[in-house]
Structures are given as structure tokens and as C-alpha cells.
Image: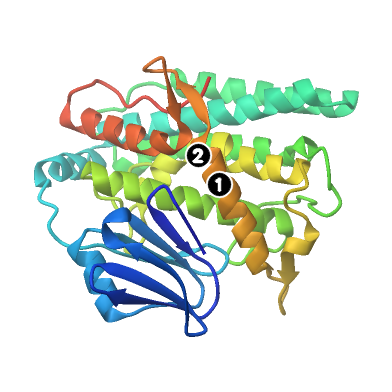
């Protein structure tokens, strides 16, 4: 259980949240552990066996506090929001752009460009810090492969007026897939410590089959939560996107937005936690069937590290100003909204300096 940057994280099994006038009272085994005035919160992130009583939910709805339910491993199950958002003109523009092959491909291309560039930066950084010459050469080769994909993405021909939506997006999705394959094929080499305990073979999820995938999936869930909150605050529909196909229950726009954050925030944090031994094998347990999940202590360690990471400052390349990483989600969501309104010609992905 933790509260930071106006988000309440509930990770302890059998936690119950009650309403007490305009305050939420958090109980564990019928003992009050925390009380939070509702006006101090923007969202609640609940993991696993957490109960929020109907009166507490009503208080959240009345004050526009979003509630996100996750499995213990961080897979998003549901998002509950209050009513009252009337920014329909922006959403109409969003829906129109999602149906337009030309607009959808332009926006999707920017999301993928940001992801590929930030992935390449991770590889270049790891190559500079590698002590083994072979590792350095392999990492440099993967970085060159991503550079070629970025070049292909930037030089793709314009979408024909009569092109179908899927055919317009498939080449972009293909480049993103090739970039992810090249990047994760050398991901193990970016680990300086604990390579045996965190051996990476391939991405696996629902459920994760090893410690590194469990760690990545959990941090991705934290990033997705912040993207959902930022998009909702900006007035966008988090469930209608461009790069990711829209289907019931899938936060496609949030998944689109988080693509550029995966390498520079999620994967960078995972590597740091492992290389500094802040997360070790003892923070995980294996369940029957081969699924790997965090212990309660492990989840708490990652959430605390995530909140510390969000407090660090970086230079936003577009505005040439220092901002906290925790603010970047909101900045990028507002940039996306400005692009959809026609205030700016293109969405500019976040590439930290």
C-alpha cells in the first residue's frame, strides 16, 4: 500500500476500502492502516484481492477519481470512471482520425518512431557501458538494425486515398514488430548483474513465465495506468486508438501512447532494478503451471522505485525545458489532443535528452 503523486496503490491481499464522510479509510484485517481525503486523489490502482465498498466507489465517482483494477501481476481488468465528461468535439475528431487511413497511419507512425528511437538509445547506452567486446558488437548491430527501420519508417510513401485502414497500418505494425524482435533478441546483454536469475528468452505474458517478463509486465501496467489517467484528463477516449486495433475492453489509445514510454521508462527501470540488485530472485514466486508472480514485497519495491523514477527531471526535447517524468504522460496526452484539434500538424513523441 502506497500513495504518491495523487495515486493510491493497493497491493496487500484482503485490503478493504471504506467511505468515511469525504475520506477513504483503508483497512487490512479489519485494522485501519491509512485514511485519505478524497480531494487528495486522482486515481486508485488496485492489485489482486482488494475490495472497494459501494459507498467508497460512489465517493470516487462523485469526485472523478478513476479506479483501476488489476490482477496481482498487473494485467488491467477494469477501469471505473465517473460521468460528466462533455468534451465530445475532441472525441469526435479522435474517432474520425481512427477511421481515416491517412490520419491513422500518420499518428501510428509517430508512436512507432518514438518507440524505435528510444529502444535504440537503450542499446547504444548499453553498448557504451558493456565490458565485453562481443556484447558491445552485438548491441551495436541491433542498434544499426533499428536505425534502418527508423529510416524506412520515415521514408514510407504516403497512403493512397482509396487505401483500406488495415492495409495502411499493417506496414507500420510490421516495422514495429521487427524492431521489437531485434531489440529483445539482445535484451539479455543489457543486464550487467543477475543474468542467470533473470535469463530472458522471449516475451511472455498472461501469465509471465519467468522473472524478467513478470517484472516487465508489472512496470508496463504502471505505465499503462498513467497513460489512461493522462488521456482521460485530456478529454480523449482511452479505448479508441490507431496503432492498436480497437476492440471491446481494450484501451487502444493508452497502448498507443505508452509505446514510446516502454523503452525509456519501463525497460530502463527494469534494467536499473536488476543491475542495482534492488529486485532479486527472492522477490518472485512460481505458481503451479509455471506462471511467475511477485511477492507482496516485490510489488511494493517496484512501485516505490517507479514513483522515485517519476520524480526525476529530464529535458523535454520539444519544449527545451526540464520536466519531471511523472508530468510527461500529461504533456504527451495534451500534444495528442492538440494534433487531433488541428492546432499542430503532427504528434511529436517523447524522446528524452
Q: Position of residue 239 (x, y in %)?
A: 30, 54
> What number is the disc on residue 40?
none
> What number is the disc on residue 310?
2
Q: Nearer the viewer, residue 11 or 192?
A: 11
Instruction: Specify the farthest residue to the top.
Output: 320
Instruction: Specify the farthest residue to the bottom.
Output: 30
Q: Position of residue 297 (x, y in %)?
A: 66, 64
As measured in the structure, the alpha-carbon distance from the residue carrying label 2 to the one carrying label 1 is: 6 Å
At 38% across and 18% down in the image, what residue appears? Answer: 318
Res 256 → quadrant: top left
Left or right of 211, for residue 79: left
Left or right of 119, for residue 284: right
Left or right of 299, for residue 191: right
Q: Position of residue 68 (x, y in %)?
A: 38, 63
Label 2 crowding class (10 Å Cα cut-off): few <14, some 14-19, many 20+?
some
Q: Nearer the viewer, residue 265 or 277?
A: 277
At 53% across and 32% down in the image, what residue appears? Answer: 312
Q: Is residue 307 above or below residue 210?
A: above
At 80% across and 28% down in the image, what residue appears? Answer: 138
What secondary structure is marked by label 2?
Answer: helix
> What number is the disc on residue 306?
1
Q: Position of residue 266 (x, y in %)?
A: 57, 43
At 52% across and 84% down in the image, what residue appears? Answer: 29
Q: Is residue 96 above or below residue 196?
A: above
Judge whether residue 33 can be spotted in this image: yes
Left or right of 99, for residue 128: right
Res 141 → quadrant: top right
Given contact means CB atoms under 8 Å apart, are the residues at marks 2 and 1 in contact? yes
Judge whether residue 204 can be spotted in this image: no
What secondary structure is marked by label 1?
Answer: helix
Q: Nearer the viewer, residue 307 or 135?
A: 307
Amino acid at each position: 500500500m502506497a500513495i504518491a503523486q495523487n495515486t493510491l496503490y493497493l497491493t496487500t491481499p484482503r485490503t478493504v476500502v471504506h467511505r468515511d464522510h469525504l475520506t477513504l479509510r483503508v483497512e487490512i484485517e479489519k485494522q485501519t492502516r491509512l485514511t485519505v481525503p478524497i480531494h487528495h486523489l486522482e486515481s486508485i490502482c488496485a492489485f489482486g484481492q482488494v475490495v472497494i465498498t459501494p459507498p467508497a466507489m460512489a465517493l470516487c465517482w462523485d469526485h472523478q477519481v478513476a479506479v483501476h483494477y488489476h490482477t496481482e501481476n498487473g494485467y488491467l481488468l477494469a477501469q471505473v470512471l465517473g460521468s460528466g465528461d462533455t468534451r465530445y468535439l475532441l472525441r469526435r475528431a479522435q474517432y474520425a482520425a481512427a477511421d481515416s487511413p491517412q490520419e491513422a497511419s500518420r499518428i501510428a507512425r509517430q508512436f512507432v518512431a518514438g518507440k524505435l528511437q528510444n529502444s535504440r538509445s537503450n542499446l547504444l547506452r548499453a553498448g557504451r557501458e558493456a565490458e565485453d567486446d562481443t556484447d558491445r558488437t552485438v548491441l551495436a548491430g541491433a542498434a544499426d538494425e533499428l536505425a534502418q527501420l527508423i529510416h524506412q519508417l520515415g521514408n514510407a510513401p504516403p497512403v493512397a486515398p482509396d487505401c483500406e485502414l488495415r492495409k495502411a497500418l499493417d506496414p507500420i505494425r510490421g516495422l514495429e514488430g521487427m524492431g521489437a524482435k531485434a531489440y529483445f533478441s539482445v535484451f539479455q546483454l543489457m543486464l550487467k548483474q543477475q543474468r542467470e536469475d533473470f535469463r530472458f528468452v522471449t516475451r511472455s505474458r498472461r501469465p509471465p513465465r519467468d522473472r524478467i517478463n513478470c517484472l516487465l509486465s508489472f512496470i508496463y501496467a504502471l505505465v499503462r495506468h498513467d497513460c489512461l489517467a493522462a488521456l482521460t484528463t485530456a478529454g480523449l477516449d482511452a479505448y479508441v486508438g490507431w496503432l492498436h486495433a480497437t476492440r471491446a475492453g481494450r484501451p487502444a489509445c493508452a497502448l498507443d501512447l505508452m509505446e514510446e514510454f516502454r523503452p525509456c521508462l519501463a525497460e530502463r527501470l527494469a534494467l536499473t532494478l536488476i543491475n542495482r540488485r534492488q529486485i532479486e530472485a527472492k522477490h518472485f514466486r512460481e505458481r503451479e503451471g509455471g506462471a511467475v508472480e511477485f511477492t507482496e514485497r516485490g510489488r511494493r519495491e517496484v512501485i516505490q522505485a517507479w514513483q522515485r523514477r517519476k520524480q526525476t527531471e529530464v529535458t523535454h526535447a520539444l519544449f527545451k525545458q526540464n520536466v519531471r517524468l511523472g508530468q510527461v504522460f500529461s504533456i504527451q496526452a495534451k500534444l495528442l489532443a492538440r494534433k487531433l484539434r488541428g492546432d499542430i500538424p503532427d504528434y511529436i513523441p517523447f524522446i528524452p535528452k
